[in-house]
Amino acid sequence: MGLVLEDWQDDDELAVWPENWLTVQVFLAMGTQWRVAVGMGGAFYSGMDYTALPVVERRLGIKAADRADIFLRLRIMESEARQRLNARQANG
């Protein structure tokens, strides 16, 4: 996902609010589902391939009633991650 070891320190903690925990799990499980366009300007992350999302949700035991809310939260995480990934690509 574009992270390198130097992005984290041994004592870094990442707090996740309980209402976001399932979304974080889905986001991490979808980490290999990024669509990447490659052209003369380099690689560009366009977003996640949602075709894998139903499989991920079932594997993680996400209840059908929670899926719409998690999808909205996932899109927020995806948008932020896409901006950071593309900025990292642009900066080399």
Image (spheres, rainbow, N blue to C red):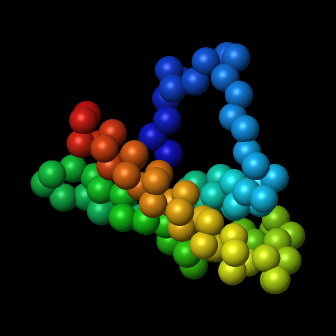
Q: Give the answer, above or below, for where 22 lies relative to 84.
A: below
Task: Identify the residue at the far top of this view.
Answer: 10
Task: Identify the residue at the far left of this view.
Answer: 40
Q: Is residue 80 left or right of residue 72?
A: left
Q: Give the answer, above or below, for where 84 lies relative to 73.
A: above
Q: How many marks?
A: 0
**Is residue 34 in view from this perspective?**
no
Q: Give the answer, above or below, for where 25 lies relative to 35.
A: above
The image position of residue 71, as x and y in percent, is 63, 73
The image position of residue 11, as x and y in percent, is 70, 17
Which of 69 and 39 lies nearest the eye of the viewer? 69
Q: Going 85% across and 77% down the picture, which residue do you hit?
A: 63
The image position of residue 80, as x and y in percent, is 46, 53
Q: Is residue 45 left or right of residue 28?
A: left
Q: Is residue 49 left or right of residue 46?
A: right
**Is residue 39 in view from this perspective?**
yes
Which of 76 and 62 lies nearest the eye of the viewer? 76
Q: Going 43% across and 65% down the picture, which residue do you hit?
A: 47
Q: Is residue 22 left or right of residue 31?
A: right
Q: Quadrant of the C terminus?
A: top left
Quadrant hosting residue 46: bottom left
Q: Going 77% across and 54% down the picture, which residue do you hit?
A: 21
Q: Going 25% across and 58% down the picture, which residue do you hit?
A: 38
